[in-house]
Image (spheres, rainbow, N blue to C red):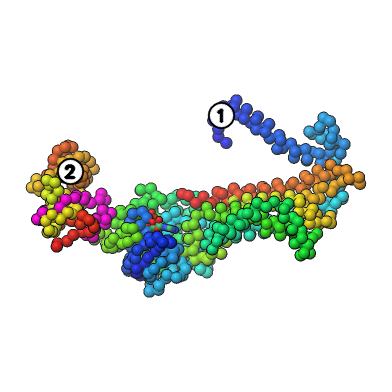
Amino acid sequence: MAPVTFSNVQKSYGVHPVIHGVDIDIADGEFVVLVGPSGCGKSTLLRMLAGLETISDGDIVIDDTVVNDLEPKQRDIAMVFQNYALYPHMTVADNMGFSLHHRGASKTEIKERVDWAAGILGLDTYLERRPGQLSGGQRQRVAMGRAIVRDPKVFLFDEPLSNLDAKLRVVMRGEIKALHQKLKTTTIYVTHDQVEAMTMADKIVVLNGGRIEQIGSPLDLYDNPVNQFVAAFIGSPSMNFIEGHVEGANFVTGDAQLPAPTALPNGKPVVYGVRPEHFRLDPAGGIKAEVVVVEPMGSETQVTMQIAGQNVFGIFRERVSARPGEVLTLGVDQAHTHLFDAGSGLRLSAA
Amino acid sequence: MKSDLSPRMKVAVYGLMLVLLIPFVFPTWWMVTSSVKPISDIFAFPPEIIPSRFDFSTYRQAFELQPFAQQYWNSAYIAAIVTCGTLLFSAMAGYAFARIDFPFANALFMVLLVGLLIPSEVTIVPLFQIFLGWDMINTHWPLILVPVFGAPSVFATFVMRQFFIALPKELEEAARVDGLGRFKIFWTIALPLAKPALGAVAIFTFLHSWNLYLEPIVFLSSPEKFTLPQALTQFTDAYGGAMWNIQLAAATMTAIPVLIVFVIAQRQFVEGLAHTGLKG
Ligand SMILES: Nc1ncnc2c1ncn2[C@@H]1O[C@H](COP(=O)(O)OP(=O)(O)OP(=O)(O)O)[C@@H](O)[C@H]1O
Ligand SMILES: [Mg+2]
C-alpha cells in the first residue's frame, strides 16, 4: 500500500508527444479511475507507472521513491492486462504463484498465498487447469489472483473488463470493488467506460488528448464539470447541449428562453448544458419542446424533443403519453444547469 | 472427419487419393521389399511387388562389409549435436531479433538472410581450406560447425524470429511485472511457448544433417569416420558393381531414425500449437 504521485509527467514517441504534462496525486488506498476516449493516453500513463514504458519528462513517485529509472520488479506493482496475459503453458496455480516463485518464496508460502487468493476469488477448484480451459470470467479472476497473491503496493488495471459480456462485466465490477474494500490497496484502473468509472472510483481522472481535463469524485464531476468535454463524457445518457446566447437572466435560443445559472454580458454566444433528468413537466415552466420520440421504460419515460429546432433528450419520472409532434411545456431546475463558453468549452461562472 | 460429400463422390475422392499415393509410397515399398530379396530377384521381370523369396542376411551383411554401426553412430551423434546447437542458437538469435531493440537490428538481419542465397557448392572449397588450416579435415568438426553457424541455422533463426514476433508482447510484460529479467523471460515464457516452431526447426535441421552428402564426401576420407549417406555408396563388390539388396537394407535402416524424429517432433509441434492459443 502506498501513495502515488505523477508530477508533470510527459511522454513522446519520437517527436510525437502523447502525454503533455500530467499531475495526479493518489492517496494511500485510493481507487482511482483513469477515463477518457480511445487514444487519449490512459494505457501509456499506466505503463509508465508500471515501468513498461520510459518516462520522457517529469517524475512518478511511489511511496516517496522516484521510480522513473526503476525496473518493473523494483516498483512492487501488480498489473492486470486487458487480454489477461496468463501464461498459457502453466496451470492456474502456477500462474498465480509465478511471481512469488521468482522472488524466492518457499513452496509452502507460495501454496498458502495461492490458496488464499483462490479462496477470495472462488478459484479453488480450477487450480490445476490451464488458462485455455477456463471461461473469460474465470481467466479474468486468475489475472486478478496473480496480482493479489503478492500483496503489492499498487494494483494497476488496464481495461480488465472490456473482453467480457455486459452481464459479467457488471458482476466483475462488483467483485473488483469488493476486493478493493477488503484489501485496501492503492488501485489505478483504466477504462473508457464512464459507467465503470462512476460506479467504482473514489476519484476519477478524465483525460483527453494526453491532458487532464478534470480530477474529482464521481459526483463532483457529474455535478460540476469544468468544461463541456467532461460534462459530455460523464453521465449516461449524456448532458444536453443547446447553442444560443445570453440575454439578461436568460439563455436564448431561437424563440425559446431558458433560465441561466449565472448572469453574463448580453449577447455572449454560449452553450447551455442540462442533464436529461433535470427537465420536468411544468405547465408554468415556459419552455416549449416538440416531441420527436417517446420511449416508455416503465420506471421512467425517455423523450427525445426539439427546443427551437435543437434536439434534446429528457428523462421523466412520470409517464408521458404525448405523441410525436405534440408540444410539451417544460421547466428546468436552474441550479442544475450550466453555461459553457461557445469557443473554449469552459464552464462559465458569474462574471 | 466430417464432410457433406455423397457416398459416390467419397469413393471417387478416396480412389483418386489412393492413385496419387502410389508415387509417394512406391519407392519406399520398393526399397524395403528389395532389401530382403536375393539380388537376382530385384530386377526380375515382371517386377515382384511382393517378394517371393526372402533373404534377411542382407541386414547382417551391411554391418560386415562396412563399419556400419560406427557410421550409424557418427550420423546420429552429429545430427543430434547439430540439432541441439541450431535450436539453441536460432532460438536465442531469433528472440533477439524479434524483441531486443539494438542498433542496426534490421540491417543485420538482412545481412544474415543473404547467407541463405549462397549455395553450399560455392563455399565448399574455401571452407575446405579453412578447415585444413584448423587441422580439422577427416574429423567431424566441419559437419557440426558448418550447419550450426551456416545456412540451416540462418533459416532456423528466421523461423524463430517470425514466431517470437507473433507471440503476444503482454505475456512478456506480465513476466516483467512479475519480476523476471530478460533471460528468464526468454527461458521460462518465450521458449516453452515456442514449442511448435522449435519442433519444426528440429525436424528440418535433423533431416538436413542426416541427409548431408556433399560435405561428408569432401571432408571425410576414412570409412570409420563416414556418415550414412556416404556409407550407402560404398556397398559394392570387388568389381565396383552395386550390391543392391545390401545397399537397400542399409538404406532402410538409414530411413528409420528419420521417421522416429518426425513422430516425436510432430507431437511437440501439435501440442505446442494447442497451447499458444492466447485468445479468449
Ligand atoms: N509504441 C508507440 N509508438 C507510437 N505511438 C504510440 C505507441 N503506443 C501508443 N502510442 C500513441 O499514444 C497515444 C496514447 O495511446 P494509449 O494506448 O495510451 O491510448 P489509450 O488511452 O490507452 O487508448 P485505448 O482506450 O484505445 O486503449 C495514442 O495516440 C497512440 O497512437
Ligand atoms: Mg489502452
Mark sitting on residue A253:
none
Could you tell whether B167 is left or right of B216 in the image?
left
Q: Is residue B130 magenta?
A: no
Residue under the image location 72 percent in, 53 percent down: B122
The spot of residue B66 in percent (x, y) is: 85, 51
Could you tell whether A337 is left or right of B29 in the image?
left
Q: Secondary structure at mark 1?
A: loop
Residue under the image location 21 percent in, 43 percent down: A304
Q: Is residue A232 magenta?
A: yes
Callout 1 amino acid: Leu
Question: Does the beta carbon of the residue at mark 2 sit less than 8 Å from ligand 1?
Answer: no
Q: Quadrant of the C terminus of chain A?
A: bottom left
Q: In this rendered view, identify the residue nearer to me: B80 or A144.
A: B80
Q: CA distance from mark 2 to mark 1?
A: 63 Å
Q: Quadrant of the N terminus of chain A?
A: bottom left
Q: In this rendered view, identify the residue nearer to me: B111 or B238.
A: B111
The spot of residue A160 in percent (x, y) is: 40, 55
Report the magenta residues as a range.
A223-250
| Mark 1 surroundings within 10 Å by alpha-carbon count, few (fewer than 14), some (14 through 19), many (20 or more) | few
The spot of residue A274 in percent (x, y) is: 19, 52
Q: Secondary structure at mark 2?
A: loop
Mark sitting on residue B5:
1
Q: Quadrant of residue A31?
A: bottom left
Mark sitting on residue A309:
2
The spot of residue B184 in percent (x, y) is: 55, 64
Q: Chain of mark 1?
A: B
Residue under the image location 10 percent in, 48 percent down: A285
